[in-house]
Image: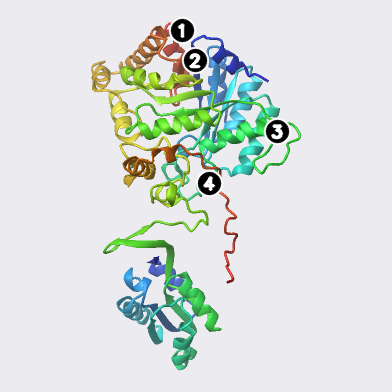
Amino acid sequence: MRSITRQKPFTEIEESLKRFNQVYIIGCGTCATMTKTGGIDEVLEMKERLEGLEKAVTGWTVVPIACDGMTDVTIKENERAVRKAGCILVMACALGVHRVTMYTSKPVIPALDTLYMGVEEKPGHFKEVCAQCGQCVLGETAGICPLTACSKGLLNGPCGGTNNGKCEVDKEKDCAWTLIYQRLKLQGRLDLMRKYHPPKNHQAAPRPKHIKL
Amino acid sequence: MESRFKRALNSGKFVVTCEVGPPKGTNIEKMLHHIDLLKYRVDALNVTDHQSSVMRFPSLGGCLSVKERGGEPILQMTCRDRNRLALQADLMLAHTRGINNVLCLTGDAVVVGDHKEAKGVFDLDSVQLLRAVRQMEAGEDLAGNRLDGAVSFCAGAVVCPEAKPIEPQLIKFEKKVEAGAEFFQTQGIYDLDNFANFMQHARQFPVKILAGIILLTSAGMAKYMNANIPGIFVPQNLIDELASAGKGQALQKGIEIAGRMIAAIKKEKLCDGVHIMAIGREELVLDILRAAEI
């Protein structure tokens, strides 16, 4: 599973750094490296662009896993450079931003937008396959999640917007329920498609989601 | 209470419904004009619900106008814009104002409309909405609480007889029947042989089917629908017929085609009636009915 991110428009980053002349940059060696949004190359490119805006980059690092507790150690190891900075620009997903926020009193600015949890199906192709809804139906939908694969997240079969196996939202996009139908048919389990799914319980995992073991 | 539309469906007559599209804005004159033109010529008037995800005057408001002017409204209700609380509330309001027909729809995706950044709700889907209607008729809300006063609706849904592949649509159709749909208004159909095949399947179920008739206004429009509207398939011979109609005559030809199809459906008793969609040209429904000799 990967946390899929996209770099914010640079003008937005520039705007959020307006009041800071010294910046410390933190990238992430895991998901953001894979999606090429917060690895070493991207961090160095950001450093250059910020210097182009006449900001001083007091230091930078790419932590192995930004959302891990070890981020605390990295920040402490780089304390001098961090202390000189007015803020920390984080090139990791929001989980990384959250971690950094836990370990510093400095303002923390995200450079990325976190889009979804995805898997890399083939190199460079990251697909959302789970909405983390707390009520998994994959056993009844041939392993295809209707919440993420259907643009409307429908539980009881295709809408009228499906056409030759494609979705009304995008002619290139497969209709989730056509895929589910084909696969269930192949498995001899088409009866599952006739099963009524009641309205979803949106409190299956209440917000803010939090589990204490 | 049995609605006037339900009585028409059960009377054995060839039922005719058509659409009224609420305006974008508060000038409802054109909508009222269409209602007045059509209210005594059809068995019921559907009022569309932010059709194609374009923000408009509400369906419920349009239905109230139909009712006030002596017509029989069918409240189109999509699941796109309201969660289960809001849907149930609107059903109760409709019931208290004598609107007792509802068409339960999933709704088009938000991004096809004019408020592309809006949140698509889809808290319920069309099958769940149908069941919600039935549950509320039994005096209970979706949380299982008792209602002080139940609702009563003739509830319907849509089906797409031209969809490919058809089997997933038929499964959904059956789920809607099981959920309590009493009538179906189909997506626009143009191939009567294919529609007859669909009806052979649909006839097994105790529901009334109204064939969707979308007015073709030109060969270009027909081609556009083939390319862009899911579930619509206008055969080449109809496109050729429209194209051969000559300058300024295509619309008249479209009316003739629609009338001819309706007459054939009625004569061959293919289904229980028709649902005419003139998409913004509702005044032409009268011409279509004349062409169909209804």
Badge 2 or badge 4: first in the primary sequence: 2
Q: Are marks 2 and 3 on the same chain?
A: yes
Subunit that carries the residue with mark 2: B
Residue denoted by label 2:
B16
Name the residue type under label 4: Val
Badge 1 or badge 2: first in the primary sequence: 2
Name the residue type under label 2: Val
**Mark 4 Cα-neighbour bin, 10 Å: few <14, some 14–19, many ≥20:** some
Badge 1 or badge 4: first in the primary sequence: 4
Q: Position of residue A123 (x, y in %)?
A: 26, 64
Residue denoted by label 4:
B121
When asked about the image quadrant of residue A47, the answer is bottom left
Q: Is residue B234 left or right of residue B102?
A: left
Q: Position of residue B4 (x, y in %)?
A: 62, 16
- Disc 1 from disc 4: Cα separation: 40 Å
Name the residue type under label 3: Gly
- Disc 2 from disc 3: Cα separation: 31 Å
